[in-house]
Image: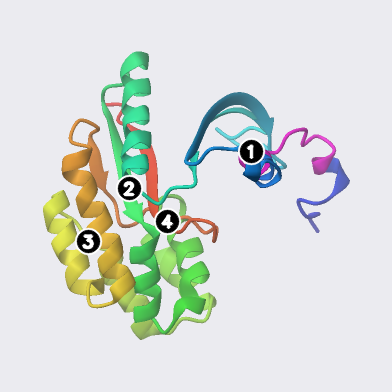
Amino acid sequence: MLEGKSSSDITERALKYDLTIPFARFVAMNHNQLTFPFRRYQVQPVWRADRPQKGRYREFTQCDADVVGSLSLLNEVELANIYHAVFVELGLTKYELKINSRKILAALAELCGGADKLTDITIAIDKLDKIGPEKVKEELLQRGLNNEQVNIIESYLNITGTNEEKLAMARSLTGSIEIGKQGIDEVEFFIPACKNTNLAIDFTLARGLNYYTGIILKPKHLLK
């Protein structure tokens, strides 16, 4: 039987887990002394309590850029432009910056019976690249969703086309739900605002962690 991630054989080597939680603690402890919106960046090695496997290591370098104290989408645009500037400096011009909205995923969960299903859905979708669509469907069924709900999610995962076509299909599927409409509007805002960043809408982009509430960004280097 494998021991959990909290076992001492792993955690004794997890020196600094990440940069995000310490930053949140710093903001909470110094809230009255900071001027908001507060921006900061930090680059530092961190160590995760993971079992090493191909392409994944306990130690890696985390590059953090954060904005706290503002709900403006212009902050998200600024972060997208940071991705672009870094990749250009590194000579990685052939890349896609994938974008989705957690709000659209929340609307998908409502279509499938309620907000309580959001975590189960996003955890399964987040594995799509690793296990493929059929295994994702199997996992959704194992997590208690029925065939009708899985079919709705499959329709969502099959959204393809240009950015404009993807938005139209997503609006048809989830736009009748207010939080879905908000998410689609936010993603639609990004297309002209980030016109130089190789932006590609990917509605299969998900994160299983509940602290994701709005825009999700993920860069992908195109090797060919």
Residue 200: x and y in percent read: 24, 44
Instruction: Answer with mark 1 or mark 3, whichever residue precedes in sequence.
Output: 1
Q: Residue at x 41, y 50 (%)?
A: 129
**Residue neighbourhood size for the residue with mark 4, other residues' Cα within 10 Å, grouped as few (<14), some (14–19), many (≥20):** many
Callout 2: SS: helix
- Residue 36: say if magenta: no
Q: Which circle's residue, 2 or 4, is located before the other in the chain?
A: 2
Amino acid type for the residue under numbered disc 1: Gln
Q: Can you identify the residue that label 1 sits on?
A: 33
Distance between the alpha carbons at the discs numbered 3 and 2? 24 Å
The amino acid at mark 2 is Leu
Q: Which residue bears the numbered disc 3?
A: 159
For marks 4 and 1, give the CA distance: 35 Å
Label disc, if present, on residue 73 of the rendered structure: 2
Q: Amino acid at mark 4?
A: Ala
Q: Which span of residues is magenta-colored?
A: 10-24
Picture quadrant of residue 154: bottom left
Q: Secondary structure at mark 4?
A: loop
Question: By what rule are the colours in the image chosen?
Answer: rainbow
Lower sequence index among marks 3 and 2: 2
Q: CA distance from mark 2 to mark 4?
A: 19 Å
Relative to 221, is 7 above or below? below
Is 20 included in the stretch rendered in magenta?
A: yes
Q: Are marks 4 and 1 in contact (CB under 8 Å)?
A: no
Mark 1 or mark 2: name the one nearer the start of the chain: 1
Q: Nearer the viewer, mark 1 or mark 2?
A: 1
Q: Position of residue 17 (x, y in %)?
A: 70, 38
- Give the structural element (helix, strand or loop) at label 3: loop
| Mark 4, residue position | 206
